[in-house]
Each structure stands twice: as C-alpha cells, then as structure tokens.
Image (cartoon, helix red, strand yellow):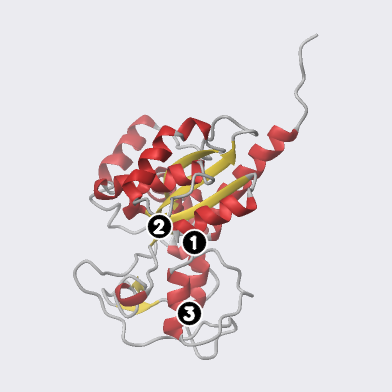
Amino acid sequence: MWPEAVRAVRDIEPKAFLFENVRGLLRPKFSEHLDWIRLSLTNPELEQLPLEDRGKHLTRLRRAELAGAYEVAVVKVNAADYGAAQKRHRVLFLGVRRDIVQSVEPPKSTHSRERLLWDQWISGEYWKRHGIRKPEKGPSSADVRTVEQMRRSKDKPQGLPWRTVRDALAGLGNPSGKSDFENHTPQLGARSYPGHTGSPADEPSKALKAGVHGVPGGENTLALPDGSVRYFSVREAARLQGLPDDYHFVGSWSENMRQLGNAAPVQLAESFGRHLMGILERASKPQRHAA
C-alpha cells in the first residue's frame, strides 16, 4: 500500500493529502517503517533505487528531509473524539506542500468522554434526551473517579459528548425482516468470548472489524441488558461508521460487514478534510502588510 501511496503523491503532486492506517504502525518495532513512510511522503521524488535496500533508502531520506516538498504530520486519533459513535483508534498522515505552509497541526478534537460522563451522571441530560430512566448502577468502576472529580469541581467539560451506540441507532428499532430501513435485517449466531465482547449501548461502539476477528467474532455485536449479544445489522454498522441511511449495500451480510469493518468513519474523515481545506484556504488569501 505505502509504495503506491507515495507514487500517487509523486505523480499527482497534490497541494495536500490525507492517509489513514492502523495504529499498530506506532509500535516501537515498526519505528523504522513508520519513519520510511513519513519521509517518503515528505520527499516523494527521492525514490528507492533499483539495487538499493530499504535501509539505505531510509538513510538517504533522512539526510534529505529538510529538502522535501511536503510538511507531514503523523497523528494518533480516536474517531470518537471527532464525532464518530465508535472507539476507532487509527494513525493519520496529514501532508501539505511546503510552498504553501511551513508547519502542519492536526485539528482539535470536538467530542470527549468527559463531556459524555457529565451528561450521563451529573446533568442527566443524556438519559432525558433518550427518554429513559437514569440507571441506578451508576458509572463504571473505570469512570467513577472522573465523575466524582467533575462533580466536586462543577467544571463542565467544553465541547460535545462522545456519541454512543444509542445515539447512532436512535429511530432504527431492532433489526427485522419487516423493517422500513434497507439492510436492517437480523443475523443469527452471535456470541461473545474473552477479549471479544459486545458493545454497550451507552458508549461509543468498539471498533468494527473485518475478517475472522469480527465476522463471526464478538466485536460487531451489541451487548443486551440480559447479558446476551446480537450482531449489528448492516444498517446499524453503517450508522456507526457515519454513513447515511440511503447508502445501499449489496451482497451477503459477511461481505457487507467486511467492507464496513475496513472503512474509515465519515466524521473522522470530514473533520480532517475540512481542516486541510481550511489550511489551503487561509494560505491562498492575500497577506496584508502594515503600512
């Protein structure tokens, strides 16, 4: 993938680009590979020579970093922080030509876990919005301390709350063969097992997965109040990825879920796309100089 991504940047010479990949690239054992990707995108004209190995090419790229055509930022993100109803951790490569800007910063997050906890356990606004009673059980053990700190400080978090599964699926109803929504039929056989459990309704979902880990594994399921799980319908999974209800899917449930599990959430792509557009628009405006 990455050699072709670099080739595309080299051939097209875009003003800006945005690539997405798994967060596993940030593991220490992949540090040189990550550096090769970043520097190759920084200086796409500096191609690997026919008889040159990757290590020697990386050395040349490092020496020529300051002469590269692009300023590139490598950003670790959680899609939930940008409005997706899904905890999807990824790494993004954000690049802008250096003849346009000299530095690139990622957009600030718009949503937060803390604001969701505030709306759920302090103001109660979350439960009121959904017309349901506030659970007696209270926040999870992992969130109790954060909620207590906010309650004592009375400092309401800025921004918007994380969007939850319940938020995303509002109005759909349960999957049914008679549903008014396309691609919203039940899929039998869901099960959970250690390390692969369903998504609670009142949090962003776990990351949708493709292949053997998600179909027929446990992640692509909703955790029900009685402790059981059921699979998300294709329409539900599409909503968790931010796709509109008129987006039509064809083929089998497993193939549809594989496509969705490999997709990037719309809200994440839109946030970073608009951010890039803003950088380019600001750079194109004439600079005013003091008299």
Image quadrant where residue 60 sits: top left
Instruction: Give left or right: position of 76 versus 266.
Output: left
Of residues 59 and 196, the one drawn nearer to the viewer in this rendering: 59
List x then y, in percent, for residue 264.
49, 61
Residue under numbered circle 1: 264
Image spot of residue 245 (x, y percent) = 60, 73
Q: Residue at x 67, y 39 (%)?
A: 280
Distance of mark 3 from mark 2, alpha carbons?
Answer: 18 Å
Lower sequence index among marks 2 and 1: 2
Q: Amino acid at mark 1?
A: Ala
Residue that numbered label 2 is attached to: 88
Number of numbered tags placed on the structure image: 3
Name the residue rendered at 40%, 57% in the picture.
88
Check disc 3 and report the residue beneath it.
256
Whether 243 is drawn above or below 249: the answer is: above
Pick the residue in front: 33 or 22. Answer: 33
Q: CA distance from mark 1 to mark 3?
A: 14 Å
Residue drawn at x 51%, y 87% as measured from the top left? 251
From the viewer's perspective, tell me whether residue 129 is left or right of residue 21: right
Q: Could you tell me residue 246's position as x and y percent?
A: 64, 75
Q: Are marks 2 and 1 in contact (CB under 8 Å)?
A: yes
Report the side of 237 relative to 285 (left or right).
left
**125 and 60: which is toward the camera:** 60
Residue type at mark 2 is Arg
